[in-house]
Amino acid sequence: PVARPYRGQIASLVVLAAVAPAVAALTIWLYARLIDDVLAPGSLGPLPGIGALYLGLTLLAGAVGFGERLL
């Protein structure tokens, strides 16, 4: 009964705690794509897309971290 008013916040924290490792795993996967698709073949074609994805993941990681600390 004591935690009843905080159920929404607890559920949000559980979701954020599950999203944080997924974002970290996607970042590692993105580094692999950078090496395999850009650095190894020497082709700069996919670099802007990978850079945009990395920027998006960085912003998402910051938002998830802020939400976790806030809750």
Image (cartoon, rainbow, N blue to C red):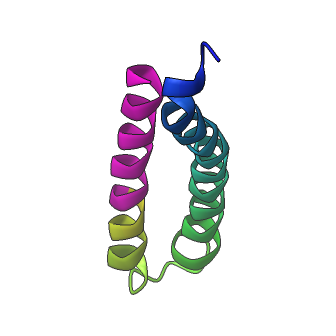
- Can residue 65 be found in the magenta stretch? yes
User: In the figure, is residue 61 to the left or right of 33?
Assistant: left
Q: Residue at x 61, y 72 (%)?
A: 40
Q: Residue at x 51, y 74 (%)?
A: 38
Magenta stretch, main secondary structure, is helix
* Quarter of the figure with residue 46: bottom left
Between residues 33 and 54, which one lies in front from this camera angle? 54
- Can residue 46 be found in the magenta stretch? no
Q: Relative to residue 31, is residue 2 depicted above or below?
A: above
* Quarter of the figure with residue 26: bottom right
The image shows residue 25 at horizontal and vertical percentages of 67, 52
Q: Relative to residue 7, is residue 40 depicted above or below?
A: below
The image shows residue 41 at horizontal and vertical percentages of 58, 80
The image shows residue 66 at horizontal and vertical percentages of 37, 30
Farthest residue, direction front:
1
- Number of marks drawn: 0
Q: Relative to residue 32, is residue 12 depicted above or below?
A: above
Q: Quadrant of the C terminus?
A: top left
Q: Which residues are magenta?
A: 55-71
Q: Quadrant of the N terminus?
A: top right
The image shows residue 35 at horizontal and vertical percentages of 60, 65
